[in-house]
Image (cartoon, helix red, strand yellow):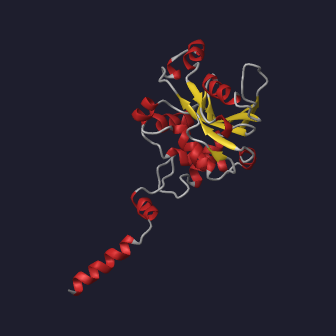
Amino acid sequence: MKKVENNNKIMRKATKIPSQFVISAIYPNICGVCGKINNESLCKKCESLLNEHAKFIIEENYKEEKYFTKHLYIFQYEGIIRRMILNYKFNEKSYLYKTFVNFLLKNEKFFKILNSYDTIIPVPISKQRRKERGYNQSELIAKELSKYLQGKYEEKILIKTKNIIAQSKLNKEQRQKNIKDAYKLFEKEKVKNKKVLLIDDIYTTGNKVNECCKKICNSNVKKIDVITIAKD
């Protein structure tokens, strides 16, 4: 009987352990670069490596055909950064969003700029693409980043309404036609008179983010800017 009672006490204690601790024990945070266990998802050695590649560029937009004011990006899409993003998108390494966000937050200049927006929106993907991949890579970054910023995260007001050919498979002219009218904005009042930050992973021609910004701008936003992890 004493053995049974002791076992019951152990079980009761176990049920009091917060679920996040259990999850952390089974799936510990790892550095997205070297793969070693690290609570910040980025060890000091690999942080130094990423600093060697970091650009932290702010590009002002002066073209009338563009619907956003600024494009901010951290890296050029090359070398180790290219490999990380490809792994993030196509090789089921969704945990890399924490590595990207934690590295970004260490830059005081970018953090101050990003903290000035009212609303944070990720570039959406189609239902079919989400089903194939299991997640939206831009959404993971936007959601994590919003935890540290004053801007409100909005997930479902910008929707991709059709599944298109992957932009990476098309040339510049084809990309612009391919992406046209692929997005729709719902609940426009949520972005009216707001400063909006649109988040994506890679900027190539800019057609995708520009089409998203075009839809958002129809709601009389104060301004809209774009941030990506890398620029090709």
Could you say which is closer to the camera, residue 183 or residue 85?
Answer: 183
Taking the view exactly as shown, the residue that stands out farthest to the top is 173
Q: Is residue 173 above or below residue 100?
A: above
Q: How many labels does the image show?
A: 0
- Residue 195 in sight here: yes
Could you say which is closer to the camera, residue 6 or residue 84?
Answer: 6
Q: Is residue 125 above or below residue 117?
A: above
- Residue 55 in sight here: no
For image coordinates 56% across by 37% down, the residue present is 81
For image coordinates 58% across by 52% down, the residue present is 45
Taking the view exactly as shown, the residue that stands out farthest to the left is 1
Residue 131 image-quadrant placement: top left
Instruction: Quadrant for the C terminus, please.
Output: top right
Q: In this view, does 117 lie above or below 226?
A: below
Could you say which is closer to the camera, residue 166 or residue 109?
Answer: 166
Residue 213 place in picture, x, y as percent: 67, 28
Residue 144 place in picture, x, y as percent: 58, 48
Taking the view exactly as shown, the residue that stands out farthest to the bottom is 2
Residue 118 place in picture, x, y as percent: 71, 44
For image coordinates 64% across by 39% down, the residue present is 53
Q: In this view, does 43 lie above or below 201?
A: below
Instruction: Quadrant for the N terminus, please.
Output: bottom left
Residue 44 place in picture, x, y as percent: 59, 54
170 sits to left or right of 16: right
For image coordinates 41% across by 63% down, the residue present is 22
